[in-house]
Image: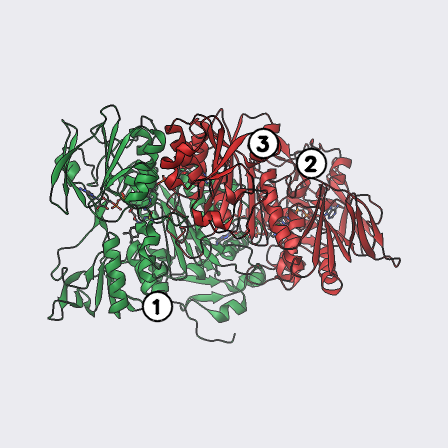
Chain colours: A green, B red
Amino acid sequence: MDEKRKRILIIGGVAAGPKAAARARRCDPGAEITIVEEGSFLSYAGCGMPFYIGGMVEKHEELMATPAGVVRDVAFFRNVKDINVLTGTRAEAIDRKNKTVRVTNLATNETYDLPYDKLVLATGSKPVRPPIPGVDLAGVYTLGNLDEARAVRQAVEQVARRVVIIGGGLIGLELADVLGTKAEITIVEMMDHVLSTLLDPELSILVERVLRGKGVQLILGSRVERIEGDGNGAVARVVTTAGSFDADLVVVAAGVRPRVELAREAGLDLGETGAIKVNEYLQTSDPDIYAGGDCVENTHLISGRPVYTPMGSVANRHGRVIGDNVAGGRDTFPGVLGTAILKVFEMNIGRTGLSESEARRLGYNVQSFICPAPDRAHFYPGSKPIIIKLVADASTRKLLGAQILGPGDIGKRLDVAVAALSMGATVDQLASFDLAYAPPFSTALDPLTHAANCLRNKLDGRARSINPLEVKKRLAAGEDFVLLDVRTPAEFNEVRLPYPNVVFIPLGKLRERAKELPKDREIIVFCKVSLRGWEAQTILASLGFTNVSFFEGGIAAWPFELDTSPRQS
Amino acid sequence: MDEKRKRILIIGGVAAGPKAAARARRCDPGAEITIVEEGSFLSYAGCGMPFYIGGMVEKHEELMATPAGVVRDVAFFRNVKDINVLTGTRAEAIDRKNKTVRVTNLATNETYDLPYDKLVLATGSKPVRPPIPGVDLAGVYTLGNLDEARAVRQAVEQVARRVVIIGGGLIGLELADVLGTKAEITIVEMMDHVLSTLLDPELSILVERVLRGKGVQLILGSRVERIEGDGNGAVARVVTTAGSFDADLVVVAAGVRPRVELAREAGLDLGETGAIKVNEYLQTSDPDIYAGGDCVENTHLISGRPVYTPMGSVANRHGRVIGDNVAGGRDTFPGVLGTAILKVFEMNIGRTGLSESEARRLGYNVQSFICPAPDRAHFYPGSKPIIIKLVADASTRKLLGAQILGPGDIGKRLDVAVAALSMGATVDQLASFDLAYAPPFSTALDPLTHAANCLRNKLDGRARSINPLEVKKRLAAGEDFVLLDVRTPAEFNEVRLPYPNVVFIPLGKLRERAKELPKDREIIVFCKVSLRGWEAQTILASLGFTNVSFFEGGIAAWPFELDTSPRQS
Ligand SMILES: Cc1cc2nc3c(=O)[nH]c(=O)nc-3n(C[C@H](O)[C@H](O)[C@H](O)COP(=O)(O)OP(=O)(O)OC[C@H]3O[C@@H](n4cnc5c(N)ncnc54)[C@H](O)[C@@H]3O)c2cc1C
Ligand SMILES: Cc1cc2nc3c(=O)[nH]c(=O)nc-3n(C[C@H](O)[C@H](O)[C@H](O)COP(=O)(O)OP(=O)(O)OC[C@H]3O[C@@H](n4cnc5c(N)ncnc54)[C@H](O)[C@@H]3O)c2cc1C
Ligand SMILES: CC(C)(COP(=O)(O)OP(=O)(O)OC[C@H]1O[C@@H](n2cnc3c(N)ncnc32)[C@H](O)[C@@H]1OP(=O)(O)O)[C@@H](O)C(=O)NCCC(=O)NCCS
Ligand SMILES: CC(C)(COP(=O)(O)OP(=O)(O)OC[C@H]1O[C@@H](n2cnc3c(N)ncnc32)[C@H](O)[C@@H]1OP(=O)(O)O)[C@@H](O)C(=O)NCCC(=O)NCCS
Ligand SMILES: [Ca+2]
Ligand SMILES: [Ca+2]
């Protein structure tokens, strides 16, 4: 071994590790770069596993191929990148004093030391496997790596008619999506709602409606007590606090935990989330040891707090910064926004920054708005609805977060919100962005511009709007108010809110018929999206009604009962 | 007339005018609001006219309907908005001293004065009709309003087999798109390239390739000398400096001019672009007169210079600010980025900020990069390529502009660039955005992140890359260099650069076969997108080659000859 070459040793061969290695090589052609990976697969798209399981991606090799079709195996890393990869090799311990890592070749059981000048921990995460009886039965899977994904795909193709997914988070829902047409799906979720760490409840409920509409059985607010077998060691049913559900395949998608054993045993600092603590250069408490990807904790760019956000996108950005720095650079990783996006049947769902619940928990002076809008000119073929919820700090008017969902193009608005959050934009600045408009792409004022303007109206005290959860709570409490529907008769015939206090007056008649409304009762207006609700608020205010508000999101985002029975007005 | 009500008078009833009126009404329920419009149609989506002409939008009423299907006519503005609209009424002169506007009812020829407290000019723009012989023949159209759009649609349906479009800008290309399957299209463009005010030439050429591929005849760098008739007053052909082209329908799409007569005659300041000058509150030089939409000039947010950017999106944002301010508010309009987006057959095209040519003209220390990438995970069904060109200020590292095109999802990346530019982001900040990733939506590092990283590599002096135009210039000059293609054999067989100095060595063999390359000649590497070009640069540099660069965009963005003849390697 040539003693003058810098030795860069990397533990973990999926995303953060190979990215750090690849970047380090480009920045330092002279370094000796080695990746140690205990598994057999390298450099694969874990994020693609659901689509591989669902069959949209035919072969697992596609998940580890370049766009040009070259598989990233050991030979690829050797020939293209001049990177030495040891698969089937486990790192057992770090000797920080001597700067070596003890590794074991899992095939031969041979153990030896690898020296390093710079060490990179990219040990990733492991799925949580809750300690419930039966979790080790045949037919019970987690989805932490490609071997597991291949096993699940095989099980799906061979046996699965009834699949129980434990966990209603991002991965659980992606699985429900890809398996929805192949099997009967039940999702068991401990929290009261799916995606409860990503979305505020009124939006989670809209996702639940889509899932149920596709025949997915949702068992919410319930715990799995045990998994039972068929007597031959194969899974037969999942027993929960809300009953028992037959299953020939169970996937536990209950979150992941960072793999920090090596770091902990080497005496490196862990953060309060339990993941490895790193500074903005992605150095651990030992400056010669870097860490990135699913094994580290991040700083949230809005709250400034440590968060655990295990994402492939983040792992890649980490890897590049680390690659730079182990090669002598000084690049920084500023932090994350907790951005996430997924597709669940025809619904696209995304979020970034803080949800309203998170912002309240953190003590912000929160203001939020829910704004449905068409994703492109409504007259343009293919226009589809989306729902944007923006959360802002009423004191600074800064955007705190965005949640966006619907069948339309949410990805664009989400990433614009990411950019706005990254740069500390106020909602006023967001509203002024010169976003691109042509009918095939957007509306003259983009949905995000509308959402920002709506929130500005609220921050300025012009709009008095309330969240649908609030309306529902007041309905349930039997409070006395008028729910004023200002849509057109055609819209009214199609779908209605089924409550006795609903009064129907189309917006175009409101000025002339307002006298039919009581001045001494509270009026809460709505329409399809509550754009006309806002307009009606201003109309009624101008006519001397003093207790008028509208509820946000209208029918389009109403998460509760709807009456769609045929009706002739 | 109740003297205590504030009188808000608005001239122009399409986008900026009605938006100002609608917002003013919500902000000031007591005001008396009047719109004067000389035409008969109100509040319509001019931007939708191409799609109406192409038949994707069936009826012109759809362009002036709300998403709920209500047509925005005089009665709508009266009943819903309490706004008085006078159609068929022309504003003739402004009397600033007495605060009145002289108007003429075009049906009765009656002339009278309308008083105002606040006046809004939303007089918009008119298409340029160049003073060439024959421009007034039957069958020669412009596309400035809905009447004209209806006439063009009728002509298309009745006669058009051969359509000549004069002008290869945004509107000309949208027309070619919607008429491409219905007629033989010729576009005559004075400049050397289509979209020459929007894109840098190497990208315009890629658009031209798509147009030609769809059978559109492009006559570039040529002027129309005259339009000739068939003897019966109908158009027969367009005579240009590059020959004569038969036509039964001619559309002049040669840009628009702001309508500033009223403003000029009232002594209001015009700007250097010829459009009305306004401050950040959108006030003209008379503080009681506001102006917005296509009749005003804007401040470019990057250059700080006045620009004329007549867009429906801008008109709506203007209108809202004006509506606020005429109702007593103090909202501001910070400026524009010259954002534009359009669809031309299967190609989506967008730009924002400064192009490289503009930035150079303005004296910036420019650095740019052209980065093709798949719009979502390449293994995910439906993944499509896009090409991003970023332009930055090498001195400040700030992003100056973005041009993005391709069949894939360009709209998202464009709007993220808009947000970044609006907030003054550096390319380093852009590269750190926590953009949303899941395979159906993006790649682990978003194409925009890659593009930003590529530009950082160049700014940092790591990457030595050149523009394809530069390569072509040096090929044409007969310079001595090696064009090194590092793609796979399969890719090479599919398509090649047809130049004698091309050498083919796949990236995976480069380390072992580099000795075949000359060390004394310049080597310019490329691949499909030049990602492997960048990698090859670093490999060859590490092997002692001192004069190596790669050209940006690779085969995917190569705007010149390609050899696609079948080949067995
Ligand atoms: C089903 C699924 C869907 C997902 N979808 C998305 C998505 O849509 N978007 C997104 O951004 N992210 C998504 N993710 C997350 C993404 O896959 C991870 O964030 C990413 O894989 C993390 O990469 P990593 O390199 O940090 O860690 P890992 O992928 O966990 O890889 C770590 C590697 O290190 C190896 N290792 C650990 N310890 C040792 C040791 N001591 N010795 C040797 N080797 C060791 C492991 O064997 C493992 O191969 C998804 C994940 C899953 C499971
Ligand atoms: C074919 C086409 C496609 C387009 N596509 C896009 C696109 O994709 N995206 C985009 O953002 N923009 C697009 N635009 C531009 C967009 O349509 C305009 O920017 C927008 O219409 C401007 O609105 P405005 O209200 O300022 O002016 P205008 O639409 O020009 O309306 C001004 C109105 O004022 C009236 N008026 C003028 N003077 C007087 C007077 N003295 N008295 C009474 N009335 C008067 C006129 O009759 C006219 O109706 C497109 C335009 C066209 C023509
Ligand atoms: C692929 C992998 C090995 C990284 O290797 P890599 O060579 O850095 O590949 P990338 O595609 O990330 O980056 C390619 C390089 O070319 C550059 N590039 C991208 N497009 C380019 C283009 N059109 N022209 C020139 N350069 C380009 C990038 O900037 C990057 O260079 P840099 O980091 O030096 O700036 C690593 O990311 C990996 O293993 N990924 C698979 C697993 C994974 O990501 N899983 C999690 C998500 S599911
Ligand atoms: C339609 C038009 C008359 C404006 O009227 P408007 O009532 O302001 O309509 P908009 O849709 O622009 O805005 C609706 C209002 O509801 C708000 N809104 C939008 N979505 C909402 C929702 N889901 N819930 C509550 N409020 C909502 C908006 O913020 C806006 O209010 P504000 O300006 O007071 O903040 C005017 O824009 C016009 O004539 N447009 C057609 C022509 C055109 O735009 N052409 C150019 C492009 S091709
Ligand atoms: Ca995923
Ligand atoms: Ca258009």
Query: Residue A469 — which label?
Result: none
The quadrant holding residue B285 is top right
Front residue of this view, candidates B568 and A271: B568
Assess disc 3: are there few (<14), some (14-19) or many (≥20) residues with their C-alpha within 10 Å of its C-alpha: few
Q: Percent from the top left, x then y, of residue A7?
A: 24, 29
Residue identified by numbered label 1? A181
Residue density around tag 2, few if under 14, some if 14–19, many if 20 or more, within 10 Å: many
Residue A234: x percent and y percent? 15, 67
Q: CA distance from mark 2 to mark 3?
A: 45 Å
Which comes sooner in the sequence, label 2 or label 3? 2
Q: Amino acid at mark 3?
A: Arg
Name the image quarter holding residue A223. Answer: bottom left
Percent from the top left, x then y, of residue A470? Answer: 36, 56
Q: Which residue is mark 2?
A: B276
**Type of amino acid at the residue the image marks with label 2:** Ile
At x 59%, y 25%, the residue is: B363
User: What is the chain identity of the residue bearing mark 2?
Assistant: B
- Asked whether B283 or B394 is in front, the reply is B394
Indicate the secondary structure of the residue bearing disc 2: loop
Q: In the visual, does A545 lie left or right of B235?
A: left
Q: Mark 2 vs mark 3: tell me if same chain.
A: yes
Chain where mark 1 sits: A
Disc 1 marks which amino acid? Thr
Q: Which mark is residue B474?
A: 3
Q: Residue at x 25, y 40 (%)?
A: A85
Residue B366 is left or right of residue B215, and the answer is left
User: Residue B425: x, y in percent?
Assistant: 46, 33
Local secondary structure at mark 1: loop
Tell me if residue A334 can be seen.
no
Q: Is residue A299 visible?
A: yes
